Image: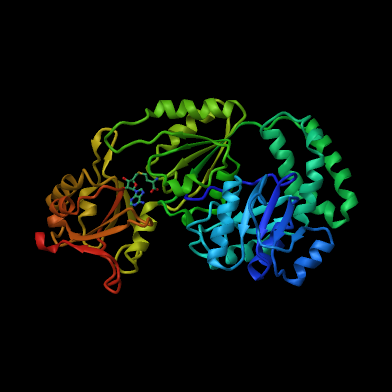
Amino acid sequence: MDHFPIFIATKTARIIVAGGGDAALAKLRILMKSSAKITVFASDPAPEIEQWHHQNRLTLVTRAMDYGDALCAKLFYAASEDEVEDARTAHLAMTCGALVNIVDNLHDSQFITPAIVDRDPVTIAIGTEGAAPVLARAIKADLEERLPQSLGTLARIGKTFRDAANALPFGRPRRDFWRDYYFNTGPKAIGEGEAHILPALEALLDTHLTKPARAGHVAFVGGGPGDPELLTLKARRALDEADVVIYDRLITPEILELARREAVMVDVGKEGFGPSTPQEHINALLVEHAKTGAQVVRLKSGDATVFGRLDEEIDAVDAEGIGWHIVPGITSASAAVAAIGQSLTRRGRNASVRFLTGHDTRGFADHDWSALARTGEVAAIYMGKKSARFIQGRLLMHGADRHTPVTLVENASRPDQRVIETTLDVLPSALEAANLSGPALTFLGLAPRAALAALPTLKLEEFA
Ligand code: SAH
C-alpha cells in the first residue's frame, strides 16, 4: 500500500485550490461536501466558481497564487491544467506546509483524492493508487446502488444516541444493539418516517438492557481449499461476527482478511509431521474462549468433518455444556477434482469413492488395499505426499495395474495450483521431481480430462 487512507478533520481547516477551469471545478464539487474553508486562486475563473463565491460556499481570489497565500492551509490542489503553473503553485504551497495534490500528476502529489460514496456521516473512500480509475468508478457505482440513501440518516441519528447506548456493557452487547439498529430496527422505522427512528432506538435499547447476556458458542467452520470465493455464505457470516478465530495452517491470508477486524486471531497451525499445537491445547483454547461468552470460529481447511479431528474438539466443547454447530465447507478433493475436469464418481466406472488419509496418528495408514487395487477404483488421498511410496508398494503388492493413473493437485483452487499427472509405477519419482511444497491431494484412478489441454499440467511419464 503506497497510499494509506485516512480521514482528515476539515471543520476548521483551510483548503486551497489554484486554477479555475474544469479540473478545479471537479475538485471543488467534491471539496464543497466537506466543512473546510475553501479558497480558490484563479485569474480567469469559471462562472460556477464565481457563483459559489457569491453564495459564500468558497472564497474566490481573482489572481494567480502568490507567496504566503497558502499559509495555514492543510490541503492544496494545483488544478490549473498547466504543468509549469502547477509546479510553481505546488512549490509555494509546500513551503507553507500544506499537503499538496497536483491534478493528473500522481508522481509529484503528496496525497490523492479517492472516489467517494457519500452517505454522510458514512463516507466510503475508494482508491486504486492511480492504477485503475475505471475500476474505482465501477466499485463506486456498485456501492451507490447497494447502499440505501437512508443509511446516512440512520447513522446521523444513531450518532446522537451513542451516549445512551453506552449504558450497555462494552463489546458484544453494544455491537449486537447497533447491528440490530442498522440492519433491522432502523430500516423498518425509517420506512414509517424519520420521526420514528428515535423512539424505535429507545425501545430497542430497553429490550437489549433487559435481555440476558449471550452465551459463548463455537462454530466449526469449513474454510474451503483456499480460494476465498469458495467459502460458503454461512462461513463468511460466521467470520464477520466472530469474537475469536482459531485457525489452521492451511487457511489462506485472503480468508483471514474476512474476519471481523476486532476479532482475536489465534494460529494453531499444524504441520504434517512438523511442529504442532497439541490437540489438547486446541481443545482447551476453544473451551477457554467460549466460556468468556465469545462467539468462537474454529476455522478448519476444506470441510471441517474431513480429516480434521473434529470429534475430539466437539467432545471437549460438549463436555463443558458449550453450544456448537458445524458449517460445511468445500473439501480439497472437490476443489482438486474440479481442477482436473473430472468427476469423483462415474456411471460404469466407479459407484463409490474413498477419501483416504496417507498417514494417521500411528504413522502410515492401512487401508483395504485389495479393494483399492481393483481397476476403476477412485480414491482421494489426503496427506499423501510422504506416504506415496508406501501406498504404491501396497497397491502393487495387491495386484493393482502399474499403469493406473495417479494425479496430484497441489494448492487446489489457489493461484499457485499445479496438476501433476503420472501413473502408479512411477509415483514416488514423479513426486520427487515435482518438488511439491504446498498441500496436495492425490487421486488414485483419475487422470485429468484430456480436453483440458489448457491446464498447466506437468507430464511425468518419462519416469516410466
Ligand atoms: N479438512 C481438510 C483436510 C485436512 S487434512 C479438507 O476437507 O480438505 C490436510 C490435507 O488436505 C493436506 O495434506 C492435503 O492433502 C489436503 N489439502 C488441503 N488443502 C488443499 C489444497 N488447497 N489443495 C490440495 N490439497 C489440499
Query: Residue 51: x percent and y percent?
Result: 81, 67
Query: Residue 108: x percent and y percent?
Result: 50, 56
Query: Residue 319: x percent and y percent?
Result: 52, 26
- Against 337, residue 170 (above or below) is above
- Against 237, residue 269 (above or below) is above
Left or right: where 199 falls relative to 452: right
Question: The C terminus lies in which quarter of the figure?
Answer: bottom left
Residue lying at 54% horizontally and 59% vertically, measured from the top left: 87
> Residue 164, can we see it?
yes
- Against 295, residue 53 (above or below) is below
- Against 140, residue 254 (above or below) is above
Left or right: where 210 falls relative to 90: right
> Residue 344, can we see it?
no
Query: Residue 184: x percent and y percent?
Result: 76, 49
Residue lying at 26% horizontally and 62% vertically, measured from the top left: 446
Pick the residue in front: 381 or 35. Answer: 35
Residue lying at 10% horizontally and 59% vertically, measured from the top left: 463
Pick the residue in front: 60 or 203. Answer: 60
Q: Give the colouring mode of the picture.
A: rainbow
Counting every numbered tag in the picture gives 0
Pick the residue in front: 155 or 386. Answer: 155
Q: Residue furthest right?
A: 195
Q: Residue furthest front?
A: 67
Pick the residue in front: 326 or 154. Answer: 154
